[in-house]
Image (spheres, rainbow, N blue to C red):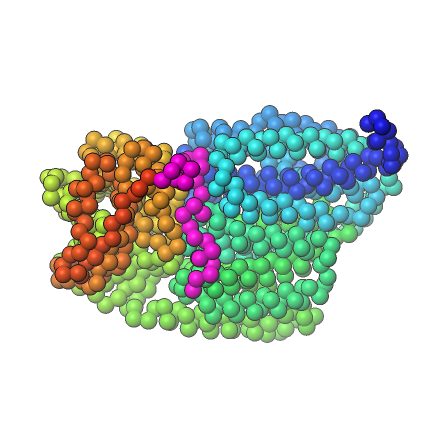
Amino acid sequence: MKLPSLLRAPFGPAELFPAVLSGTVFAIVPLAAFLSFSVQPLAGKLLLPVQGGAASTWLGTMLYFQSTLLLGYGWAVWLLRRPRGVQVAATAGLALAALAASRLGWIQASPWGGLGGVLLTLTVATLPAMVLLFSIAPLMHGWLRGQGRPVPYHLYAISNAGGLAAVLLYPLVIERRVGLSDQMFVWHGLLGVLAALTAAAGIAALRCAGAAPPAPEPAAEPIGFRRIATWVGLSAATCLGMLGATHHLAAEIGSGPPAWVGPFGAYLLSYLVVFSGIWQPRFNLVSLGWLAISLSGFMLTKGVSDATVNGPTALWLLSLTAAGSFFGNGLLHESRPRERFDLFYLSAAAGGVAGGLLATFAAPVLFLRPSEFLAVSCGLLMLGLVRLVDRRQVLVVAVALVIVAAPVIGLDWQQTRRDEAGALRVRRFRNLYGCSLLRYEEGGLVLFNETTSHGSQLTASAASRTRPTLYYTESSGVGRVIEELQKSRPAIAVGVIGLGAGTLAAYARPADTMTFWDIDPKAIRIARDFFTFVPDSPGKKILLERRDGRKGLEASRDDFDLIVVDAFTGDGVPPHLLTREAFAAYFARLEKRDGILAIHATNRYANFFPIVGATAHSLGWSSLRVGTRIEHTTQTRDWDCTETRYLLVFRPGRLAQVASWLPAREDDGRVTRTLTAYEPLPPGDAIVWTDDRHAQLDALDFVRYLTEP
């Protein structure tokens, strides 16, 4: 049978093009969502080596994609009010522009820096493509609606299924197995497939126009300001809650795709289920109960305390995120319009942008701790109680507020008192980079960033203030290396990525120089104004630079005897600091002085040694893991000590010398060490991080993180 006859049977001319339209729409919508959600982490990873790990990089990336989401929806709303021929022609033109103008590879060559530079770079590289991708879902709704069908809200579920697939697959599969250059190639190829499918759908939509009964006029359904505000508010609340939960996870395992999987996945899953057609009003009541239970569980295991977010606490966090997302989006589904889906989608997109802006700019000002997540949960729970009694009086709202807020505030007060027990005074700081806490204790001062201690200082006397403490004591890996370098060299130059309390400045002699790089202005202020390691250091020159450490070293023309990478985010180290290209920049500054690279790797759930060892070995350098356990302090060494792990990288000929600096036992067993030299693995087993291929899950035991108490 010839192909034309296949096309004619079993469809007649009147049935063929509606079937083609439906088939292509069901392929286009999830593909567009997959491409839009997978390009976001791809663009962020492309930006890191050229922009650095500054907040402007991640903030600019988030703001750009949220803005283009709103722009894409706005474009679709405007286009759906035009004649069908104009819609198809404009969409085809936009698809051609997207194919011609998408230049993901150019991101790595962008000359612009800072927040404005990130936004401008992404605009030049992807704007037509992002407007096309984000406009697809509402546009396809309109084309199907033009056939006289009911508003196909199930396409919203299908779209979020594509987004959910991208959110799950990117950290678990894509970034671990596919390099960025190959990701760009595949992404551009799929964009071409999307453009072809969109053209086919447009032709079918044109042939269907006039064959179907006219859809009801959207303007016939009046939509008031209060209803629009409800859509915006609910969308903003669920987005803010999801971002707040992500903040907690990122503080433990580092900011990157693994931290987004749970909260963002739960958020998208709620859209998928709620708008799939199976959602019933009674499910909102179930979600409300789920929300109350999850809020109680999270408050009892974490709440506002400084407890680590892992194991059961992380599971309660994800449960609370999911419950809030299902309840909020259930209410959104309940209030959806019969016809004005275009305005509904635009309002929801505006709410998502508002939630992102609130999380980024307002929350750090309003909350000294990351409490916006709890505030959203309480607000949704209170809204549910008011709906249950079906009364909107001020007294009812006030009573509902007390019922919800009183237990949370009570636990808040109890947890705060428990965390601050024994402290003379506590000060909290927060900005875009996270939350810090200073504990003033009798005889000392301790700095915490989220749930990780970043430094301490003795304050009992002028002499005690000069003693290095915590991870940086004299018997730690970095302490011993500094002491040995100082024995053989009249002056040493040290570069440090990550400032903390500035403890390493205590080692500087009058002839020594130290340069610290840190991207967080809050960290620089704390080290200068509250700790005295940097101000009182006897070093010849102690510099504090607000800059990404890798970018600072790449721009530096100084040579160093030692470079220390101490850029912690909970259990995560920013991957762009550990790639082959980053190591090449470090080694260029170490080679002249035959220097050493020391990487602080005191982690709970991450093991960077196989990656660091393989990456350094690929450049011809050797690695040594140093685990140090110190039983107790003495009057002269190791005050406020803790167990530490450092990874040392150096020229191969220095292995025996460096190992001799770090004996297995010292001081009658008070100090014990475990030394492990990196043994090269077969090429297929070694994991070498490069700017093109690196993944946090290579080093992080994610299952253990979620299941171990």
- Which corner quadrant holds the N terminus? top right
Residue drawn 70% across the image and 33% down it: 197
Residue drawn 54% across the image and 57% down it: 241
Question: Residues in magenta?
Answer: 681-709
Examine the rendering and report whether any part of residue 552 can be seen. no
Residue most extreme to the front: 682
- Which corner quadrant holds the C terminus? bottom left
Residue 179: where, in percent of width, then height? 48, 35
Give the prevailing secondary structure in the magenta stretch: loop
Residue 703 lies in the magenta stretch: yes
Residue 258: where, in percent of width, then height? 48, 49
The quadrant holding residue 694 is top left
Relative placement, left or right, of 334 versus 563 is right
Residue 639 vs residue 219, the one in the foreground: 639
Residue drawn 23% across the image and 32% down it: 591
Examine the rendering and report whether any part of residue 242 can be seen. yes
Relative placement, left or right, of 144 versus 58 is right
Residue drawn 82% across the image and 27% down it: 3
Relative placement, left or right, of 10 versus 611 is right
Residue 60: where, in percent of width, then height? 48, 41
Relative placement, left or right, of 402 versus 552 is right
Residue 493: where, in percent of width, then height? 19, 39
437, above or below 131, in the image:
below
Residue 110 vs residue 588, the one in the foreground: 588
